[in-house]
Amino acid sequence: MPLIVDAYNVLHVTGVLPPGLAGPDTLGLIRLIQSSRYGGDRAILVCDGVPDESAPRGRHGGVSIRYAGSMQLADDVIVELIDRSSIPRRLLVVSSDRAILRAARRRRCRTLTSDRFLARLAADSTRGFPRVADNRPSGPLAAEDVDRWAREFDVDLAALEAKQAETMPERTPSGVRADPVAAPPAPGPPLALPEEVLREAERMVDQALQSGRLPGEPDTME
């Protein structure tokens, strides 16, 4: 489930995190997310202002940082991301800002206030959720993962299956090429997305996060 996080709104919450975790900076928030139940999800942290030289930026595993810049607020960027999303019901929007929550609920996004989000991160830190490394495999995926990639990146599975069938040799148990009229070929292995499709899908996700668009959004200009 993709997340849009009002970063500074979350970081300004006090009295929720235990002393050992209290007062995190942006990188600390990223580490808390990565070691929580949301560690396997894609997320955008939207921050106010323009980053200085020491501020974190770019992509950190599955978490991307976006700064609003000097001409608008993070709230405006978040509302724009919500309004432009083609998958609003799959988004989780984290903020306590009323305007952001209204925009999210109008588009049927899932919402979570900043204090409740931090409370979940704190609870997860004591449960030992494994930190999710950014080393997703580029080989064949499980069937449910293939379906997920197909939906998010508009992959024609029927066309891929036909292409795979064309390149797969038809052989009898003795190793002699089968007569396609006399006997049907033995069933091939379960369909797996080709490596080039997987690499392109990962590239699209990273590019979308860097530009502020989430996976599944149309690449349009307003």
Image (tube, grey):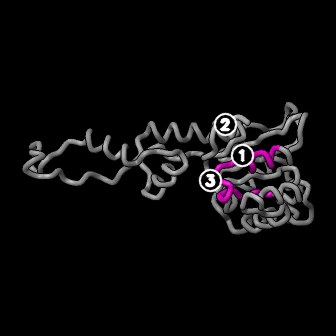
Q: CA distance from mark 1 to mark 2?
A: 9 Å
Task: Say left or right for 140 vs 109.
Answer: left
Q: Can see residue 175? A: no
Res 53 → quadrant: top right
How dense is the environment of label 1, judged by Cα within 10 Å: few (below 14), some, or many (20 and up)? some
Q: Sort mark 3 into few (<14), some (14-19) or many (20+) by Cα contacts within 10 Å.
A: some
Residue carrying label 3: 132
Where residue 97 appears, as percent x and y from the top left, is 88, 57
Can residue 156 be seen in this snapshot?
Answer: yes
**Viewer-nearest of discs 3 and 2:** 2
**Mark 3 is on which residue type?**
Val
Q: Is residue 111 magenta?
A: no
The answer to whether the residues at label 1 and label 2 have Cβ atoms under 8 Å apart is yes
Left or right of 86? Residue 177 is: left
Query: The C terminus is located in which quarter?
Result: top right
> On the image, numbered disc 2 is attached to which residue?
220
Does residue 2 sit above or below 201 in this rendering? Answer: below
Q: Which residues are magenta?
A: 77-94
Q: Of the residues under marks 3 and 2, which one precedes in the sequence? A: 3
- Would you call the spot at circle 2 few (<14 residues within 10 Å), some (14-19), or many (20 or more)? few
Queried whether the magenta region covers residue 91, the answer comes back as yes
Q: Return the residue at label 1.
A: 84
Do the numbered discs 1 and 3 sit on residues whose CB atoms are within 8 Å?
no
Secondary element type, mark 2: loop
Residue 17 position by quadrant: bottom right
Q: Quick one: 97 or 16, which is closer to the camera?
A: 97
What amino acid does circle 2 point to?
A: Thr
Nearer the observer: mark 1 or 3; the answer is 1
Q: Position of residue 109 (x, y in %)?
A: 72, 59
Q: Which corner quadrant holds the N terminus?
A: bottom right
Q: Which mark is residue 124?
A: none
What amino acid type is highlighted by mark number 1?
A: Arg
